[in-house]
Image (cartoon, rainbow, N blue to C red):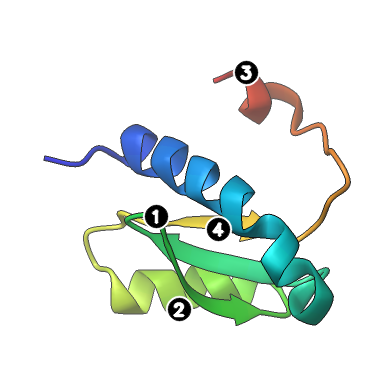
Amino acid sequence: MTTIRSEIDSNFDAFQRQLYASLAAHRGEFALMRHGQIIDFFERPGAALVAGKERFPDAIFSIQEVSDEPIDLGVWSHT
């Protein structure tokens, strides 16, 4: 059974491998990911979240910003 934490971790690893291929066309957008695959790109994180909840009622997905700039997520980066 996939947990949300393991899904986020595996999606992040897959996203990092695909990042530079996505930057040219999708910089600043948000990737909806599931099981290591980019499902779609969205201009706003809220739109990606709504789409994820609609497509995946089990809530097993993650959202990654298409950026090569490191960000500090505060407390979320340490959980």
Tell me the distance, in whole angstroms, between the alpha carbons under discs 3 and 2. 26 Å
Comparing marks 1 and 2, which lies closer to the viewer? 1
**Looking at the picture, which amino acid does disc 3 mark?**
His
- Work out whether 32 lies above or below 8: below
Q: What x and y, as percent, mark residue 44?
A: 71, 74
Give the side of residue 48 with respect to residue 61, left or right.
right
**SS for dot 1:** loop
- 13 or 32, which lies in front? 13
- 40 or 75, which lies in front? 40
**Looking at the picture, which amino acid does disc 2 mark?**
Ala
- Work out whether 30 lies above or below 76: below
Q: What x and y, as percent, mark residue 21?
A: 69, 67
Label 1 crowd bin: few (<14), some (14–19), many (20+), radius 10 Å:
some
x 28%, y 69%: residue: 56
Q: Which of the two discs, 3 and 4, labels the residue nearer the N terminus?
A: 4
Tell me the distance, in whole angstroms, between the alpha carbons under discs 3 and 1. 22 Å
- 40 or 22, which lies in front? 22
Q: Which of the two discs, 4 and 2, labels the residue nearer the N terminus?
A: 2
Q: Read off the residue under disc 1.
A: 36
Tell me the distance, in whole angstroms, between the alpha carbons under discs 1 and 4. 11 Å
x 20%, y 41%: residue: 2
Q: Read off the residue under disc 2.
A: 51
**Looking at the picture, which amino acid does disc 1 mark?**
Gly
Where, by quadrant of the figure, is residue 34 drawn?
bottom left
Tell me the distance, in whole angstroms, between the alpha carbons under discs 4 and 2. 10 Å
**SS for dot 4:** strand
x 68%, y 23%: residue: 75
Q: What x and y, as percent, mark residue 17?
A: 59, 49
**SS for dot 3:** helix
Q: Read off the residue under disc 4.
A: 63
x 69%, y 70%: residue: 22
Q: Read off the residue under disc 3.
A: 78
